[in-house]
Amino acid sequence: MIWYLESTLTAVQKKNWMVHLYTFLLRKDILPVHYYCWKTRLSTLIPLALFAALFLLLSGCTYTVNNTFPPAVPEAPSYSPADPSGDMLPHHWWTVFDDPKLNASIDKALSDNFTLKKGYARMSQALHSRKKTASLLYPQLDSNFSGTSTWFSGESQENRNNLTLDLSWEIDFWGKLSSADKAALFDFEAGRDDVETVALLLSSQVADNYFQLIEQKLQLELLEKQIKVHETFLDLITLRFANGAASVVDVYQQRQLLAADRAKMPLIHTQIATLGNRLDILMGMAPVSTSLPTTYSLPSLPPIPLLGVPADLLQNRPDLRMLHKNLLAADHRVAAAVADRLPQITIGGTGGLLNGDLFLTLFGDAFASIVNWGSLKGEVEKQKAVVQEILADYSQSYITAIEEVENALVTEKNHMDLLKALDDQLIISQATLKETRNQYMQGLTDYLPVLSALVSLQNLERDILTRHRQLISIRILLYRALGGAPILDAFPPATG
């Protein structure tokens, strides 16, 4: 239904029409005589009063957004392990390992990784989409110029030049445009947190890949030492066999063990190459198998950082911040959908030159949907359902984040207990190998106990090395689960 504030009636026609209407009402005793005397003043006040009453009535139909939206789960007071007395997690969490090569690798990844650059591009898209939405809050001015030339018989010519400026402004009485603008703003902020999520994941992947590469290098060195031990044992057994103190079976058993260890070498070289290639990819480079420093080792773990309370994850984890911004954006879209059911009021005007004459036209337009068969209400309910969907995702992600922290803490504790037990087992294995070797050299036993003790010891050495690296990976998972301060120092400026 469209009301035009600008009537096509002339002023005289308006006056005659009003006189006839009031005369009719007076004759029918519908209006008192003194009402006619105030017709001019009331004819001005009645539309204003009706508009004010309509505005107040429809204002109660708007939607109030929720600016908090906590997760729909009971608040956890603390983590199950006791809060350690460590320090706050640094701005760049990976610096706790005090490894310059690792720091340089992560810095390069945060600068050149293409997945991160893709996130920057998405963030820029959201920024410019927000600028487009915000522009609708302000008057829109368009211009048009046209020129025509017409030739008639007799060589006469007529030229017409028109220049017009069209101004229109939708007044945001009900907050539809401002709600859409705020939703777009939260979309942009969610995109920024999404980039932070990618950066946090990327830094943890680089660190974990880097320490896996160090582990494989150390495994290669350990295997080379173990092969030398096998060669020494083989020389000893061969000498004893030549002297008739050992059987040929002992020689073949030691040769078999030596060959088995040599067969492990290609597998480790493959792991080193693939891990190096993966590290290059994470840093935005073509695979060239990045080399490690000349000296390298697995670091000792620093103390567990301050954990805080589980509710801190809502501010420290960028993925949870992103979901919260998405939730706020969706709620503002509910407000925009509710406001879309109310009348839209637009004012403006057109002015310019028409065949050399100046002209000006002002207008006001009010549009309201009367019958839409539930399409506008359906959009409101749809947006409310989107809010509930994101709220469920937000709540699930929150308790999953708590689970990740809890799992990392309990896994690290049990893993350290495992390493302590393996160290004790290593001492026993070394003593067992020494004793069985002495008995074999004295001819008190055959070579099988020596062989079994040697295999057990060397497998245990390799296992302990892997467990040390796994302990570092678990700590990296804890750092990633805790989140912390944004790790990106600054975002690139939006282009365009």
Image (tube, helix red, strand yellow):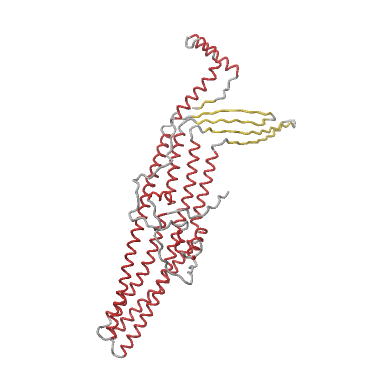
59, above or below 494, in the image: above
Q: Nearer the viewer, residue 116 or 361?
A: 116
Q: Residue at image x 34%, y 61%?
A: 413
44 with respect to 472 (left or right): right
Question: Which residue is the extreme one toward the right?
Answer: 155
Percent of width and height locating residue 149: 69, 34
Percent of width and height locating residue 33: 51, 9
Question: Which residue is the extreme one toward the left?
Answer: 444
Q: Nearer the viewer, residue 147 or 66?
A: 66
Percent of width and height locating residue 181: 50, 40
453, above or below 10, in the image: below
67, above or below 373, in the image: below
Q: Nearer the viewer, residue 419 or 165?
A: 419
Q: Residue at image x 40%, y 56%?
A: 306
Q: Quadrant of residue 94?
A: bottom left
Q: Nearer the viewer, residue 236 or 247?
A: 236
Percent of width and height locating residue 106: 48, 61
Question: Which residue is the extreme one toward the front?
Answer: 85
